[in-house]
Image: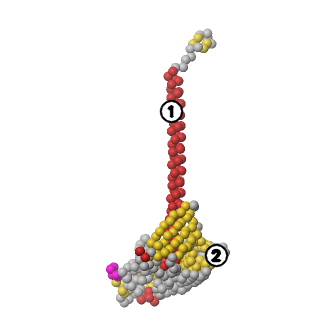
Amino acid sequence: MRHAGNGVLWYAMRTPGVRHQQGSVYIVALLTLTVLGILATAIGWSALVQAQQAQRREVRWRLESLAQSGVTYATWERRYNGRRLPFTHTLSLSEGTVQIRAEKDPAYGDNAMKVTTTATSRGESITRTRIVDGTPQRRAPFEFALYVGRALVVPPGSQITVKGDVHTAGLLSVLTGGNLQVEGAVISLGRISGSVAQTLYREPFSSIGTHSIVTLPELRMKATQLRVGATHLPFGLSLSDGSIYYVQGDLRIGGTLQGRAIVVVEGNLYILSNLDYRDEDTLFVFVVGGNIQVPSGRRVRSILVDQGGTVQLGDNTHIVGGVIAMGSASFGTNVVIEHDPRVNANLFQQEARAEEIDDDGVRPVEIDDDDETISPFWGP
């Protein structure tokens, strides 16, 4: 009870209903905060679990990749270098280490080889066993992203990135200030020196068979189209599958390519502009008797084969297919070369039956789809 200013007494009372409503608000707020805290904890725990699972998946993927690298190395050593069985080896790669043991396994055949690999990365390990074919073979040049028939020297300032394997038939030297990054293996008949980084392994003093590279006279005998003199094709070229387009002179070309074909150039090959495929079924091989020149900034989708001249790749060039330089090669800065995995071991083994060249310079080729000596022109 309080006394008012005018002498009147009055009661100030708070009703029980008001107190009950305020208490309910406090309880609801407390419950809301509790629920939000529980949700935040659950979300944080879920994020932590997902991060740990992602990390485990990454480590697992890394270990599986390392283990497969060991199998690839053992297969290479046995099949291409003729290493005697059994043998053991340790690969020290940027992602971890791989312990390898390769031995015969007659249960699966006379040439069967059992490869056991133990991969270790970031404190974790896995062991994998694979049965592979150990039959001795000779690797062909076109199986490489970059093949150089002489010495390969990377000058100062050059940055070469090769997505695939590299082989040189002579010295492989990266001079001070140069850099060679290989997403694959590095193989050389000579010594390997300088800043060479590879994701698989390096094999100095290993030879490669060159018997599979067909000669220009052989290709001329199978030509389906013959062009005499210098040829200028600024808008590209469209050919039927299995065609052999033969140029007796220099060829200047740019634009879009379509079909699965071989273009033979007796003289020099000049890339005028970007050379691209019209679709993913297209696959072109350029076989050149003279020099191949790719100016700076060009992107070329094709396999470039030089029979003995010089392959010149300018600054910021990008080759998607592969470069086979039976002679020498020179590189500018920021050069990227990618291997086309569609190329198989029978690239130049087509045995097409040809008729005589007609008056238009076109020699029709009869192809029997059931004849296996014709179809393995390209990879799968």
- Which portion, as a residue range, is magenta? 367-371
Sequence-earlier tag: 2 or 1: 1
Residue 170 position within the rendered picture, expressed as x and y whole percent measured from the top left: 58, 83
Residue 14 position within the rendered picture, expressed as x and y whole percent measured from the top left: 54, 20
Magenta stretch, overall SS:
loop
For the point 53% across and 37% down, which residue is it? 33
Q: Is residue 38 above or below residue 304?
A: above
The residue where tag 1 is placed is 28
Crowding near the residue tagged with mark 2, few <14, some 14–19, many ≥20 C-alpha atoms within 10 Å: some
Crowding near the residue tagged with mark 1, few <14, some 14–19, many ≥20 C-alpha atoms within 10 Å: few
For the point 51% across and 85% down, which residue is it? 307
Quadrant of the image for the C terminus? bottom left
Q: Is residue 50 left or right of residue 109?
A: right
Residue 172 is a magenta residue: no
Residue 218 position within the rendered picture, expressed as x and y whole percent measured from the top left: 44, 88
Q: Amino acid at mark 2?
A: Gly
The residue where tag 2 is placed is 194
Query: Foreground residue, 195 or 368?
Result: 195
Q: Is residue 178 left or right of residue 116?
A: right
Query: Foreground residue, 316 or 178?
Result: 178
For the point 45% across and 79% down, which residue is it? 135
Q: Is residue 312 left or right of residue 367?
A: right
Which residue is farthest top? 7
Q: How much space separates mark 2 and mark 1, taking CA atoms?
A: 71 Å
Residue 298 shows in the view? no
SS for dot 1: helix
SS for dot 2: loop
Rendered image quadrant of residue 348: bottom left
Query: Foreground residue, 52 or 8?
Result: 52
Q: Amino acid at mark 1?
A: Val
Which residue is farthest right? 176
Quadrant of the image for the N terminus? top right
